[in-house]
Image: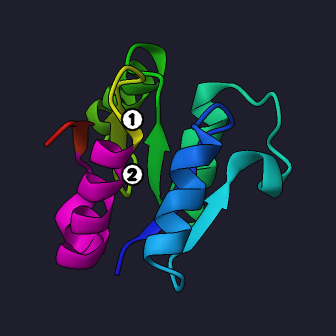
Amino acid sequence: MLVFAADEDFDNDILRALRRRIPEIDLVRAQDARLRGADDPRVLEWAAVESRVLLTHDVSTMTSHAIDRMRRGEHMPGVIAVHQHLAIGRVVEDLVLIATCSTMEDWAGRLDYLPL
């Protein structure tokens, strides 16, 4: 199963629903890792060091920084950018599918957007 990180602004309702659907999920919020207010490159670095696929709603700057990391050849376990206008149920369904049907190797150096 994938190991996730969520950036500071990621919707907590989605995280709670995901935890209800997959109680054993390994998911850490950036603020719980003492990264409240950290800039995007720092959050990406933390996710890389922790080998966690990062969940973000920041489909502009966070994704740009992720692309920059990949261009520089830096380790990146993956980023899943979730548009904020999506229904929570749809996002949770997609994340459950991703979490249970893919591996960390599938996401290495990858940037994808929800919906699937």
12 and 89: which is toward the camera: 89
Mark 1 lies on a secondary structure that is helix
Three-letter code for the amino acid on which mark 1 is drawn: Arg
Cβ atoms at labels 1 and 2 below 8 Å apart: yes
Q: Which residue is drawn at 44% across and 24% down?
A: 65
The quadrant where residue 5 appears: bottom right
Residue position for label 2: 76
**Counting residues from the N terminus, which is met first, the one under dot 1 or under dot 2?**
1
Circle 2 packing at 10 Å, graded few (<14), some (14-19), many (20+), is many
Left or right of residue 6: residue 29? right
Mark 2 lies on a secondary structure that is loop
Could you say where residue 13 lies in the image, as x and y percent from the top left? Answer: 59, 46
Q: In which quarter of the image is the C terminus?
A: top left
85 over 97 or under it: above or below: above
100 over 59 or under it: above or below: below
Residue 97 falls inside the magenta stretch: yes
- How many numbered discs sit on the rendered protein? 2
Q: Give the range drawn in magenta.
A: 89-110
Left or right of residue 97: residue 54? right
Left or right of residue 65: residue 38? right
The colour scheme is rainbow
- Residue 26 appears in the figure: yes
Residue 101 falls inside the magenta stretch: yes
Residue most extreme to the bottom: 24
- Residue 51 appears in the figure: no
Three-letter code for the amino acid on which mark 2 is drawn: Met
Could you say where residue 14 lies in the image, as x and y percent from the top left? Answer: 51, 48
Residue position for label 1: 69
